[in-house]
Amino acid sequence: MVKLIIDGRAVEVQPDQNLLQASLSVNADIPYFCWHPALGAVGSCRQCAVRVYRDDDDQVGQIVMSCMTKLREGMRVSIAEREVAALRESVVEMVLANHPHDCPVCEVGGECHLQDMAVMTGHSGRRYEFQKRTHLNQNLGPFIKHEMNRCIGCYRCVRFYRDYAGGDDFGVFGSRANIYFGRASEGALESPFAGNLVEICPTGVFVDKPFSKKFRRKWDMRGTASVCGHCAVGCNVTLQEREGELRRVVNRYNDAVNGYFLCDRGRFGADYVQSEHTLRSARLAGSAELAVNEARAALARVLATPDLIGIGSPRASLESNFALRTIVGPENFYLGIHDTAYDMLDVAARLIRSARMTVASVRDVEQADSVLIIGEDPSETAPRLALALRQAGSAGVHARANRNAIPLWQDISVRDNGCETPGALMIMSPAATELDDVAWLTLRVRPDEAIARAAMIAHAIDPQAPPCADMPGIMPMQVEQMAAALLAAERPLIVVGCMTGDADALRAAANIVEALMRRGKQARLSFIAPEVNAVGLALLGGGRMSACFEPLAAGSANIVVLENDLYRRFPHDLLDRAFKQAGSVTVLDHIETQTTAQAGLVLPVASMAESDGIVVNQEGRAQRFYKAIFRQTPSLPAWQLLRDAANIGDWPTLSALVRVMSGTVEGLEHIVEVGLDAAFRIEGIQPASQPHRYSGRTAVNAHHDVQEQAPPSNEYSPFATSMEGYHGAQAGVPVPFFWSPGWNSVQSVNKFQSEIGGSLRHGDEGVKLGGQDQDSSGYWPVTISPAEPAVLLFIPCLPVFGGEELSALSPAIEARMAVPSASMNIHTAALHQITEGATMDYVTQGACMRLVTEIDDHLPDHVVQIVAGYPGQPPLPGPVHGQVRHITARADG
Amino acid sequence: MYIYSSLRTLWFTFLHLFHKTETIQYPEQKPYLSPRFRGRIILTRDPDGEERCVSCYLCAAVCPSDCISLQKSSIEGDWTPEHFRINFSRCIFCGLCEEACPTSAIQLTPDFEMSEYRRSDLVYEKEHLLISGTGKVPDYNFYRVAGVSVRGKAKGEALNEAPPVDARGLMP
Ligand code: SF4
Ligand code: SF4
Ligand code: SF4
Ligand code: SF4
Ligand code: FES
């Protein structure tokens, strides 16, 4: 710790920060624009000036930019001194000289960092009376609205977009006072992290476009802590709601998971809850809508039959899955995922339960110093994790800065100093990935080849690890190089996901981690699970689906499907047969799917935004989401619907169900610690979820009924749905909206952190499960199943936009989905007489996809990468062999 | 001392017998109300005849009885309110909305004759609030000074604005 004296007050701060960060951490406010805790300092806005004195005798001191100033023991600093305060005010005045008169029609008004800083410096009157500079705007796609006039030239946007997120289609143009932040030509911002510009920009240049269409000021929306449901990273989000409508999704800081950033799928994908795909009413096949009580009675009749089969879902909460599992009996509960995912998740669950293996959090990933990625493209399957991997890619740059004693917050110096340093990633994947530019080694190999190499690396690190039979084309030198790179690191990380479609990939990865640990390394594993609660489902346990289809073929079982579109996962003919044989098919879901279309009885249930529950992310972190949207005619959460229909008395409340679950399911003991009980109170009062200035309470419903109605109640959450209740940070209470006096913008998160950029003062959310199995060291057997040579291998690619079921139903994401295509290299295309742009039939077992062909020379021979996961596309759960057929011209042309 | 002040008060009260009477025969006779009297609220139009309100929500935020509810238009770039509702059965005619309004859209008028037999008739929608004139502020047009381009006004065409910068220009 370093001692500072700020305006006569002695404080102690962490030494590795700049003066601005240190002051903010002890509540000494200095206005700033260009510095950001995650981006470091560049000293471009000149707003953070303070006076620093040489020693105790120095009465004059000198004015410095606090963000560019290193800490010195006993440093004497003045923020309040008159001259420097006047300087800061004049900087704001000059920044505002060209600023448009836009606040009333500016989407960030009321949560604008520029407004806050202007107030903080005391600047209030405009003196500049000459012409204002103006700029033309660009159309930046369906996510972001551009209003360049409001720019103050702080450079945060380019530094985030290019330096932090690795985008290259956005930059700064022009010179002197004319600089322009935008794209070379109009068009959608390509980076899947572009949405963060909304929160990064201290002004209203970048605005959430879908939000602008249902705009409300920050103080007018109820904020609810939730978890993003669009991949297994489980980023923490705040859902902001008003009048029963989800208005927008904003980042909710969690140091261990998403930190300051979300991906665009998470930010813009949640509108599926109010799209035309939302399932609103119950129905029986072939008949019209069912009334609510009829539907419940029908469900009760189904649940009373013997021969029940329950199919769970990786996108439903742990509670709902547990309810179904209990009702049908654990032996009749199937996980509802493809067998390849089942096998991988089975291994993943065991690794999470193991006391020896450390599964990396996103923060751990960021801090890794050498990374091996096996057969996965994380930028598609876990975008936020990919952003963390990109930071890990700069490990060499940071190491070099440390060697040269450059503080890591000195952003430009660190980057200039390390510009020649190669990235810290090694990527083995069939297709090019977004992370290739921060990798020193990229190998374009088939999944089986990647797994073989992984097994060899483990063996090269520790000869006790199982060896791997030789495969043609693998250079031992390369394997040794990779092993050496991992061994040279302090915190090596192995990343693997489901794209390989082979649990051996995960076993081989676990072996590398084990081998590295035996060599004394702090090695970690990151497994990219396929969906938001896939790991939770695996920890809960159930049968594999191939086993489920057997009893179905034999008898007339009654199937109950929970929030799962099986047609996305299994061959359609197989399902059609199974459904025909079944006694009855009941589907509970919140969206219309191909499965609901086939069901006998369909019941609407609440989505994540409309219910409470727990999901478990890929590292085994159980996180609670709270009900954010209150509709006039709400759907019940699935667990409650099932409970009432099956008449189970054990779970009067959600907490009771969670307690039962923690008592019955091995590995879920700690689940009771997740989230807040509905009875939780702070000094006898509920925490509030609306800001104090929530407006319009006595008019909003007055056209229906002039009597004011009571705010909606939620029996499962402790949060008051109104502004009446406890405001302010409290231990264990997720923050419904970040706000602090004088800090209306998202930057107010500073005031909630124990140290700036660190964990939240009252603890980061989530409870990490697992780690209880003591006797789990040792190596896994790995078998390589080589792909057949010279036969086409279809490899799925799940695009960020469209590759995930729920977000693909959100209008903004839909607008970003490309036409599905198949890619192969020029050799393979020539071999099969396919030309670029040709539409062909790509045929695998049970599925035929008519796709446009693209040429991608990164792909290995005989590999076809197929865009999968779009709504209505036939399933392609993992690499499979297939054929390509020319479309025979039909008679009708 | 006390006796003196009591007698003095009585004397002044007595003198009122000879003053001009303030009571008038309402409703036959209308009282004079100054233009800044805080009565029925209206929404006004700018000098070009366009709706002034830009859905900034400041009036709703400042309203102590929370009786203003509105929603910005769902059309991109259009800031006129989709609906604008004031519940006059809650309004206390404090005038804070008028004070907060950055566009002079919302104004209080010297009309106080709004009583109704049913409370629900005191809920006014935009069609009841919007008048066709500029009200007390004849000249102000927010969009002429704002930087956004709306209603056919392009960038650089607002008051005191330079033409848009050419970001590709090479001139120093
Ligand atoms: S960026 Fe801030 S200061 Fe500028 S117009 Fe928007 S709200 Fe006002
Ligand atoms: S667009 Fe925003 S973030 Fe970028 S330089 Fe301008 S004010 Fe800063
Ligand atoms: S989709 Fe995944 S990475 Fe993106 S915000 Fe959601 S949880 Fe985070
Ligand atoms: S303050 Fe004025 S411009 Fe803003 S919403 Fe109210 S009436 Fe409209
Ligand atoms: S924050 Fe220090 S110069 Fe911008």
Image (tube, grey):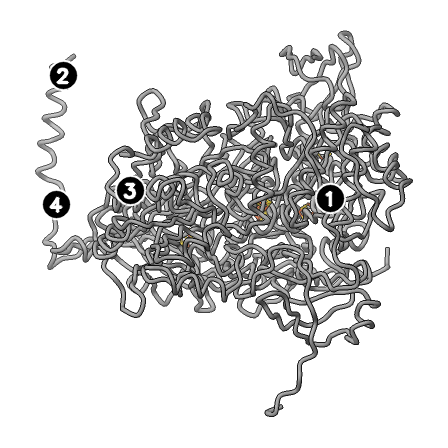
Question: Given the image, what chain letter belongs to the residue carrying mark 1?
Answer: A
Residue A95's spot in the image, x, y percent?
68, 43
The residue lying at 46 percent from left, 57 percent from top is: A565
The residue labelled by disc 2 is: B4
Mark number displayed over residue B21: 4
4 or 1: mark nearer the eye = 1
The residue labelled by disc 3 is: A643
Q: What amino acid type is highlighted by mark number 4? A: Thr
The residue lying at 76 percent from left, 34 percent from top is: A466
Q: What amino acid type is highlighted by mark number 1? A: Ile
In whole angstroms, how far apart are the C-alphas of marks 3 and 1? 42 Å
Residue A154 seen from this side: no
Mark 3 residue element: helix
Answer yes or no: are tags 3 and 2 on the same subunit: no
Mark number displayed over residue A374: 1
Mark 4 residue element: loop
Please state, as top left, top right, bottom left or bottom right, where the N terminus of chain B lies in the image: top left
